[in-house]
Image (spheres, rainbow, N blue to C red):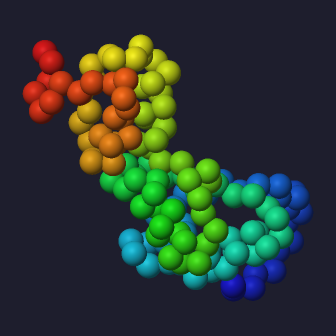
C-alpha cells in the first residue's frame, strides 16, 4: 500500500462501509491498494461491509468477485440495491401482491419469492 504521512488526528476505526466500483475495483480489475487495506482490516479484526447501487449483478456475483480478489466477503457483508429493493417490497406490500419489476435480471431474481406474483411481461395497467 502506498505510504502517506498524515498530520490528521483520525478517530479509531471500528468498522468500514465501502462502495465497490471505483473503490475496490474498476470493472473486472481489483484496485491493489484497496485489496491490501481490506486484508489489513480483516487481519486486525475490523469488520467491513460492501455496498453498491449497481443492480446488474447479484450479491452472489459480487461475493464471488471479491473472493476472487482474495478478499473475505460473504452474503452477510455485501449489500446490493437489488437486495435492498426486494426487502423494501416485502415489508411494504402484503404477500401475493402482484409486482412488475423493471430492471436487471438480478433485480427480478431478488424480487421473486414464493409469496409474490409477477404479471409476466406486460404491465398490469
Identify which residue, 84 or 32, lies in the foreground.
Answer: 84
Residue 67, horizontal then vertical, whole percent: 54, 72
Screen quadrant of the N terminus: bottom right
Q: Position of residue 60 (x, y in %)?
A: 45, 57
Q: Nearer the viewer, residue 95 or 25?
A: 95
Look at the image and tell me in which quarter the C terminus lies: top left
Can you tell which quarter of the image residue 42 is in? bottom right
Q: Residue at x 34, y 17 (%)?
A: 96
Residue name at image x 70 percent, y 75 percent: 39
At x 42%, y 33%, the residue is 86
> Residue 118: image x %, image y %?
23, 27
The quarter holding residue 100 reads: top left
Tell which residue pokes out farthest to the left in this image.
Answer: 122
Left or right, 46 with respect to 89, comes to right
- At x 27%, y 48%, the residue is 105
Looking at the image, residue 1 sits to the left or right of residue 95; the answer is right
Q: Residue furthest bottom?
A: 2
Amino acid at each position: 500500500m502506498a505510504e502517506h504521512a498524515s498530520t490528521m488526528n483520525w478517530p479509531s476505526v471500528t468498522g468500514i462501509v465501502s462502495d465497490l466500483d471505483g473503490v475496490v475495483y474498476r470493472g473486472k480489475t481489483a484496485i491493489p491498494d484497496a485489496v491490501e487495506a481490506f486484508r489489513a482490516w480483516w487481519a486486525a479484526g475490523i469488520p467491513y461491509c460492501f455496498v453498491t447501487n449497481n443492480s446488474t449483478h447479484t450479491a452472489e456475483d459480487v461475493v464471488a468477485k471479491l473472493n476472487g480478489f482474495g478478499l473475505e466477503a460473504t452474503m452477510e457483508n455485501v449489500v446490493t440495491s437489488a437486495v435492498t429493493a426486494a426487502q423494501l417490497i416485502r415489508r411494504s406490500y402484503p404477500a401475493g401482491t402482484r409486482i412488475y419489476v423493471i430492471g436487471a435480471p438480478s433485480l427480478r431474481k431478488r424480487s421473486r419469492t414464493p409469496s409474490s406474483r409477477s404479471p409476466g411481461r406486460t404491465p398490469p395497467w
